[in-house]
């Protein structure tokens, strides 16, 4: 339920910020939010680590514990934490710009103020989910937040076909990952 907050939160934040800066010139708003967007991006990145990295670390540590490699007490070894951080950093470095381009230009065209609202709403959702222990993916929160900001401008500003393709990819990912996991399990079982 927490995860469903990204769309309306981004929409509401955009409406509040628009109302607060209604008498400002577009240039002044753009300049101010270019700076503020650095902070919102940083907050969103921390939320990304608090959710996506934690899930990966938990799975690896859970497997190590299940195999008896952690001893009697459950903990997350430092090498697991560091390897997850490196993997996420490399993944962001290699594929991050493509994702940023899709999110920032293909779903809807974003100005700095809209990017700030989307990132802030996404970060708030991620922190709330982390607080309640709900695993939420950043690849789910940011498209929803961007769609909310775009829809606040006007519904036709959102390319709904792109948003729909993203949702379809989400629905395919889970069963595909389960299938590949089962396949590797059967191969490992046959080998041992």
Image (tube, grey):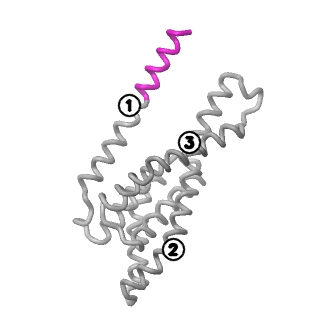
Residue marked by disc 1: 176
Determine the secondary structure under disc 3.
helix
Write the start and end of the magenta stretch as one range: 178-192
Quarter occupied by residue 158: bottom left
Q: Earlier in the sequence, mark 1 or mark 2?
A: 2
Determine the secondary structure under disc 2.
helix
Left or right for 49, reference 145: right
Q: Which residue lies furthest to the front in this view?
A: 94
Percent of width and height locating residue 6: 43, 59
Classify 170 as above or below 126.
Answer: above
Depth check, front residue: 53 or 131: 53
* Cα distance in 3D space between marks 1 and 2: 39 Å
Residue marked by disc 3: 87
What residue appears at the point 27 percent right and 52 percent down from the top-left corner?
A: 162
Classify 79 as above or below 46.
Answer: above
**Which quadrant, please, contains the C terminus?**
top right
Percent of width and height locating residue 52: 54, 46
- Few, some or many residues within 10 Å of mark 1 (<14, 14–19, 20+): few
What residue appears at the point 49 percent right and 19 percent down from the top-left corner?
A: 185
Please say whether residue 179 is one of the residues in the magenta stretch. Answer: yes
Classify 71 as above or below 49.
Answer: above
- Few, some or many residues within 10 Å of mark 3 (<14, 14–19, 20+): few
On residue 36, the disc is 2
- Few, some or many residues within 10 Å of mark 2 (<14, 14–19, 20+): some
Percent of width and height locating residue 154: 26, 70
């Amino acid at each position: 339920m927490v995860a469903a907050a990204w769309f309306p939160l981004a929409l509401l934040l955009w409406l509040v910020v628009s109302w607060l800066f209604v008498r400002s010139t577009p240039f002044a708003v753009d300049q101010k939010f270019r700076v503020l967007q650095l902070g919102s991006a940083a907050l969103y990145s921390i939320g990304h680590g608090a959710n996506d990295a934690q899930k990966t670390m938990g799975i690896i540590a859970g497997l190590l514990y299940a195999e008896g490699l952690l001893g009697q007490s459950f903990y997350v070894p430092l090498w697991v934490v560091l390897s997850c951080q490196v993997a996420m950093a490399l993944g962001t470095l290699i594929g991050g710009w493509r994702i940023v381009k899709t999110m920032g230009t293909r779903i809807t065209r974003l100005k700095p103020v809209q990017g700030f609202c989307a990132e802030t709403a996404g970060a708030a959702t991620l922190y709330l989910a982390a607080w309640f222990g709900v695993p939420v993916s950043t690849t789910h929160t940011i498209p929803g937040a961007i769609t909310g900001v775009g829809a606040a401008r006007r519904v036709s500003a959102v390319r709904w076909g792109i948003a729909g393709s993203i949702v379809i990819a989400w629905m395919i990912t889970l069963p595909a990952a389960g299938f590949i996991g089962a396949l590797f399990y059967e191969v490992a079982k046959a080998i041992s």
